[in-house]
Image (tube, rainbow, N blue to C red):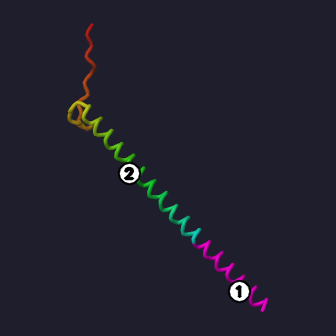
Amino acid sequence: MKKKKKKKKKKKKKKKKKKEKEEGRKREEEEEEEEEEEEEEEDEEEEDEEEEEEEERERRLPLTPFIPLHNAVIQPPNRMH
């Protein structure tokens, strides 16, 4: 009788440990997913900020047409003596 009780207790302990391990794994996976989501959100926020900064720079720059170098006319500097 005592052996059966001991076996039952051992089985319960094993089940409990196994369940705790599974719960621990699930928690770890959830935490990792949350961290990944937070990192993605931060990356998106940084990209949005960079885009806004680029737009501000473009607004500040004077509107001059871009002249490719192969079409550009190179003029000597204007020297006034």
Residue 44 tag number: 2
Compared with residue 32, is residue 65 higher up or lower down, i.e. above or below? above
Compared with residue 35, is residue 4 higher up or lower down, i.e. above or below? below
User: Which quadrant would residue 55 be assigned to in this image?
Assistant: top left
Of all residues, the one furthest to the bottom in this rendering is: 1
Along the horizontal axis of the image, is 24 left or right of 8?
A: left
Q: Secondary structure at mark 1?
A: helix
Of all residues, the one furthest to the top in this rendering is: 81
Task: Classify the position of the C terminus by image quarter.
Answer: top left
N-term-proximal mark, 1 vs 2? 1
Compared with residue 54, is residue 41 higher up or lower down, i.e. above or below? below
Determine which residue is flagged by label 1: 8
Residue drawn at x 63%, y 76% is: 18
Residue nearest the viewer, comparing 63 with 59: 59
Q: CA distance from mark 1 to mark 2?
A: 53 Å
Q: Which residues are magenta?
A: 1-22
Q: Is residue 2 magenta?
A: yes
Along the horizontal axis of the image, is 34 left or right of 79?
A: right
Q: Is residue 39 magenta?
A: no
Task: Classify the position of the N terminus by image quarter.
Answer: bottom right
